[in-house]
Image: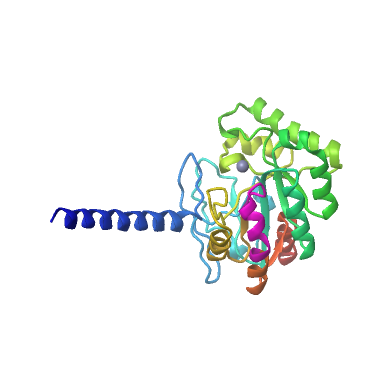
Amino acid sequence: MKSGYGQVIIMGLVFLLIVLNQVQLSTGAELHIPEQNIPLQLSSSGTVQSLAKNIIFSRTEELLLPPQQTVAAPLPLPELPELVFSGTAVDKVAITFDDGPYPGKTEQCLEILSQYGIRGTFFIIGAYGLRNPDQLRLIVEQGSELGSHSWAHGRLDKMSREAVLSDLKRVADLIYEVTGQEVRFIRPPYGRYSRTVIAAAEELQQQIVLWNVDPRDWDRASAKEIVQRVMEQVRPGSIILLHEGHPNTIKALPLIIEGLQGRGLQPVSVSELLQSYGEETL
Ligand SMILES: [Zn+2]
């Protein structure tokens, strides 16, 4: 009898774990605005992606989508009225890498991108870039682009205006000194930002870029899991978040690229993705 109850309890626990795991997986793609969890729906012809916040532009004039692809007005963002979220109009998806550069791994990543003739966007941590300037140059030489991921992976949303400005400037100056490239994009660590961060980015003419495909590759995921999660979450116009410091991410990268191409989705850098929105609206 006792072992019978034990089995039931164990089975119950297993079931609970499975359910919890499913819940975690199904919500993995969601982003949230830390201050306020606002469910957003992109109204478009047929495709509705709730909580699919690809890109944040800090000025409404920079809306790069055709009108039918924009978030239904009025924007449910009383605190952050200037934010506009992009949609799903193109057959391209951006591949982005955070937290580098990592000597050795960044090179492997670039080699794979080159094999497929594609570019990515690398959101680098300034302090790592200072230690590894060669990797920054290689990223640019390969044709990929550099974005900022703050100087030391700090919580920008908790910093003062002066601190955020000096942090973002420091990264931008480093990238400019090493590569001659102006930084156009900032991805705040943990996706956390505030009005102050938005204003500081705008002042430095940097656009905040988030993501809407997150395979959680840093969280002990196998290469197979990373590929599966990306392919489950990805939609036309998505921005995929990867971390090139993880060996399984590098293993998964060719399979992700081939999976996307097999679905008719072309992997590109963030600026290439934005350009294609621009072309559509011209
Ligand atoms: Zn990060």
Query: What residue appears at the point 54 percent right and 64 percent down from the top-left corner?
Result: 228
The quadrant in which residue 102 appears is top right
Q: Quadrant of the C terminus?
A: bottom right
Q: Is residue 183 above or below residue 227?
A: above
The quadrant in which residue 272 appears is bottom right
Which of 279/172 is in front?
Answer: 172
Which of 191/106 is in front?
Answer: 106
Report ligand 1 position as a quadrant: top right
Residue 248 falls inside the magenta stretch = yes
Residue 209 falls inside the magenta stretch = no
Q: Is residue 19 above or below residue 45?
A: above
Query: What residue appears at the point 36 percent right and 58 percent down from the top-left corner?
Result: 18
Whether residue 51 sits left or right of residue 178 in the image: it is: left
Magenta-highlighted residues: 241-256
Q: Is residue 117 above or below residue 82?
A: below
Number of numbered discs on residues = 0
Residue 86 appears at what percent x and percent y?
Answer: 61, 57
Which of 3/79 is in front?
Answer: 3
Whether residue 29 sits left or right of residue 100 in the image: it is: left
Residue 271 appears at what percent x and percent y?
Answer: 74, 55
Residue 274 appears at what percent x and percent y?
Answer: 71, 58
Residue 221 appears at what percent x and percent y?
Answer: 54, 54
Which of 234/85 is in front?
Answer: 234
Q: Main secondary structure of the magenta part?
A: helix
Query: What residue appears at the point 76 percent right and 62 percent down from the top-left corner?
Result: 118
Task: Describe the colour scheme in one phrase.
Answer: rainbow
Q: Quadrant of the N terminus?
A: bottom left
